[in-house]
Image (spheres, rainbow, N blue to C red):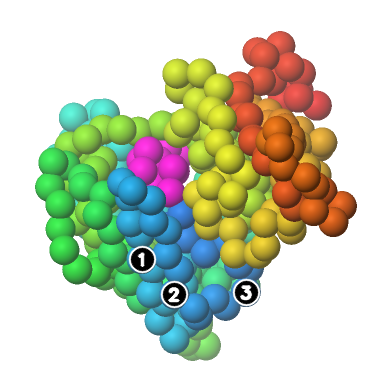
Amino acid sequence: MAERKAKTDQRELFFLDSPLMTEVRGERSLMAYPFFSLSKGKWTKPLAYKTDAVSIEIVPNANGAATIYDKEIVLYIASLMIAKLETGEEVSPDFYFTAHDLFCVTGNNPSARSYARLSQALERLQGTQIKTNIETGGQGQEGYFSWLSEALLYYSRSEDGKRERRLKAVRVRLCDWLYRAILRDRQVLDYAATYFQLGPVERRLYEIARSSCGDGPYEIELDELRLQLGYQNSLPHFRHALKAIAEHNSIPDYMLSLTESIPLGDKPKGRGRRAAHCLVLIQAKPKTLSSEIAQD
């Protein structure tokens, strides 16, 4: 490993932290709570999540809030950091990696469009402001931070006279909040290999399941789950989407079911659906079922 990195350093003039040689992993709080926009388009409205114990505020910049797809970069960086810690290497908040390895890990085609999207994603990760009372590394903080306090793309020029740029490496500086969480708390969980093939809602459902079902099934009210996902549409719309996901059984390693009931003494309003009390049960799939689906 050290010899390979030394050769890479001599050839590229960067000490690269990539390629990632292990599975993708993430920090538990980043899995459990809605830190990213689920919108595929540009989301410019502030986002918020608040319970008795947790508060999160997200303020987009002119380019929009960091999205669940931009989160792929954060997960990749976190995985690089965790891999270094496991081999006993010293870690700093600064990471150098190749866009090509990032694309390989996340399943993106290394096209010109992907490189353009990478630049835009880095801008959103650096520009989006987050404020939360979640403590990491035994330390709380006041005020706002961004996922990346620095993000730079290093290019070289071709020698054929066309002056075309070639991306050599990406340099990022991870925020202190997440850096402390990984370095000190070590509340780290691996991701399913098919995670990056999921849609935005399915990704969040998987993350909530992965972070909440460690001690058994996780039961939550429908509206609470909607808020925990960061789902911005109405509750009836969310119920419809969730039922479709449950029927398709499309969450890796986990399955969910909805139970609707009308409390005693309550009369249905209209068609009765909006008055129904709905609970969502999330639990691990039986091992045999998970393996059969993986083979398919």
Q: Amino acid at mark 3?
A: Gly
Residue at point 57% right, 78% down?
42
Structural distance between the alpha carbons of marks 3 and 1: 20 Å
Q: Amino acid at mark 1?
A: Glu
Q: Nearer the viewer, mark 3 or mark 2?
A: 2
What is the quadrant of residue 40 in the picture? Answer: bottom right
Q: Which residues are magenta?
A: 24-33
Residue at point 39% right, 68% down?
58
Give the secondary structure at mark 1.
strand
Q: Amino acid at mark 2?
A: Pro
Q: Residue furthest right?
A: 271
Label 1 belongs to which residue? 57
Give the secondary structure at mark 2.
loop
Structural distance between the alpha carbons of marks 3 and 2: 15 Å
119 part of magenta stretch: no
Which residue is nearer to you in this view: 18 or 61?
61
Please give left or right for residue 216 compared with residue 84 in the image.
right
Q: Position of residue 150 (x, y in %)?
A: 26, 70
Q: Position of residue 218 (x, y in %)?
A: 54, 28
Which badge, 3 or 2, comes first in the chain's sequence?
A: 3
Structural distance between the alpha carbons of marks 1 and 2: 7 Å
User: Residue 41, which numbered label?
Assistant: 3
Which residue is nearer to you in this view: 14 or 101?
101
User: Residue 46, which numbered label?
Assistant: 2
Give the secondary structure at mark 3.
loop
Task: Determine whether 286 is above or below 89 in the image.
Answer: above
Residue at point 59% right, 64% down?
232
Q: Residues within 10 Å of mark 2 (few under 14, many from 20)?
A: some
Task: Determine whether 131 is above or below 197 in the image.
Answer: below
Question: Looking at the figure, which quarter contains the N terminus?
Answer: top left
